Amino acid sequence: MSTAAPILLTPGPLTTSARTRQAMMVDWGSWDDRFNQLTASLCEQLLAIVDGAASHHCVPLQGSGTFAVEAAIGTLVPRDGKVLVLINGAYGKRLAKICQVLGRDFSTFETAEDEPTTAADVDRLLQADAAITHVALIHCETSTGILNPLPEIAQVVAGHGKRLIIDAMSSFGALPIDARQVPFDALIAASGKCLEGVPGMGFVFARKEALAAAAGNSHSLAMDLHDQHSYMVKTGQWRFTPPTHVVAALHEALLQYTEEGGLPARHQRYADNCQALLDGMTQLGLRSFLPEAIQAPIIVTFHAPKDPRYQFKEFYERVKAKGFILYPGKLTQVETFRVGCIGHVDPAGMRAAVQAIAEVLREMEVLDI
């Protein structure tokens, strides 16, 4: 393993396969028929993952996942709507910030970073505030790896006649979500996560009726999903310069996704990665932040060693020199670091990462093992 090409144990960007990287070696014309066919095929394959072809449109958008989240809020929430934002981490807080910046009325419900929002919480909140039109939920909160109970919350939201917007950035493609069983107006994800593409493109699965009714809602020309979709239907093209190499890489990554066995196989590999990581770190005496019952197999947050000789920056650089890139913690109350389980990596790779971590902590005289 070369230090020039480390394994990214992060929640995205993440390690991609040689085939995916090779797909970016071809230049595409943005109006070329072959590229338009690539985009159409991509959207068709993405919709199939959520069984959403009958009920939703897939609207791709240039930019990071946060661009797509902002586009979904700005397009699908009317300017006189109100969003209930469910928060138990940094990305829920970011979603609330988006509502604030866009001038959408919103309220928040925040639980501890190791406490999922419950369907009972949502039921109570919706009963208490009739002005709420939309509920926004982070499915897997990347700041900790916590999994929120999406199916149960979705049923409560639908039962109240409200609309659900799901940030599924860190779960889509690895954790099952079926649009025929989970009612939602929007589900948002991106190219550089569990599908193992490269960053640079988001996409929104928008309920057909909601998108059709969204003309004129958007605060932005570039972020208008209604306009983006309408233009694509009319011309087959993106409105503005598309991330051609990112689209090609994701199309290739999806071919490999299917070859691997689709969502069940991707989920199983990540679950195996997560278990190998947890088992190895437990043997080192490093504690995970979340209990197993609410730990998604996407990214694991670990308590930092209490030894004063431990400093994250040095720890990070030493592990990087051994071929693995970790992620800093994102919690405010306790010092942590994070290790991703996703990307083109298998359990053997996770065990090698644990071995590298053990060697570094010995070198720093933090662990005596």
Image (cartoon, rainbow, N blue to C red):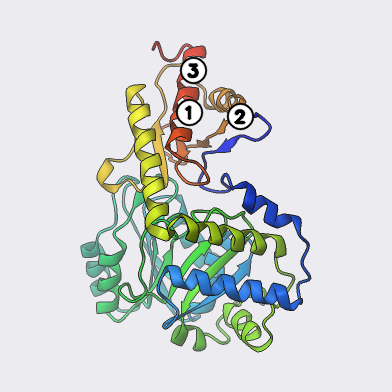
Residue 186, percent from left and from top: 45, 73
Instruction: Please indicate, yes or no, whether residue 362 appears anywhere in the rendered image.
Output: yes
Residue type at mark 1 is Ala
- Mark 1 and mark 3 lie on one chain; the one further toward the N terminus is 1
Q: Residues within 10 Å of mark 1 (few under 14, many from 20)?
A: some
Residue 104, percent from left and from top: 49, 73
Residue type at mark 2 is Met
User: What residue is shown at x 62% (from left), y 55% (from top)?
Assistant: 199
User: What residue is shown at x 78% (from left), y 62% (from top)?
Assistant: 27
Looking at the image, residue 350 sits to the left or right of residue 313; the answer is left
How many numbered marks, from 0 up? 3
Residue 357, percent from left and from top: 48, 24
Residue depth check, mark 3 versus mark 2: number of the one nearer the observer: 2
Q: CA distance from mark 3 to mark 2?
A: 16 Å
Q: Indicate the quadrant containing the C terminus: top left, top right, bottom left or bottom right.
A: top left
Residue type at mark 3 is Glu
Q: CA distance from mark 2 to mark 1?
A: 11 Å
- Mark 2 and mark 1 lie on one chain; the one further toward the N terminus is 2
Q: Disc 2 designates what residue?
A: 1
Q: Disc 3 designates what residue?
A: 359
Instruction: Please indicate, yes or no, whether residue 74 appears anywhere in the rendered image.
Output: no
Do the residues bearing badges 2 and 1 touch, measured as CB atoms within 8 Å?
A: yes
For the residue labelled by badge 2, is the local secondary structure a helix, a strand or a loop? loop
Q: CA distance from mark 1 to mark 3?
A: 11 Å
Q: Disc 1 designates what residue?
A: 352
User: What residue is shown at x 55% (from left), y 26% (from top)?
Assistant: 319
Q: Residues within 10 Å of mark 2 (few under 14, many from 20)?
A: few
For the residue labelled by badge 1, is the local secondary structure a helix, a strand or a loop? helix
Q: Identify which residue, 236 or 21, lies in the foreground.
A: 21
- Mark 3 and mark 2 lie on one chain; the one further toward the N terminus is 2
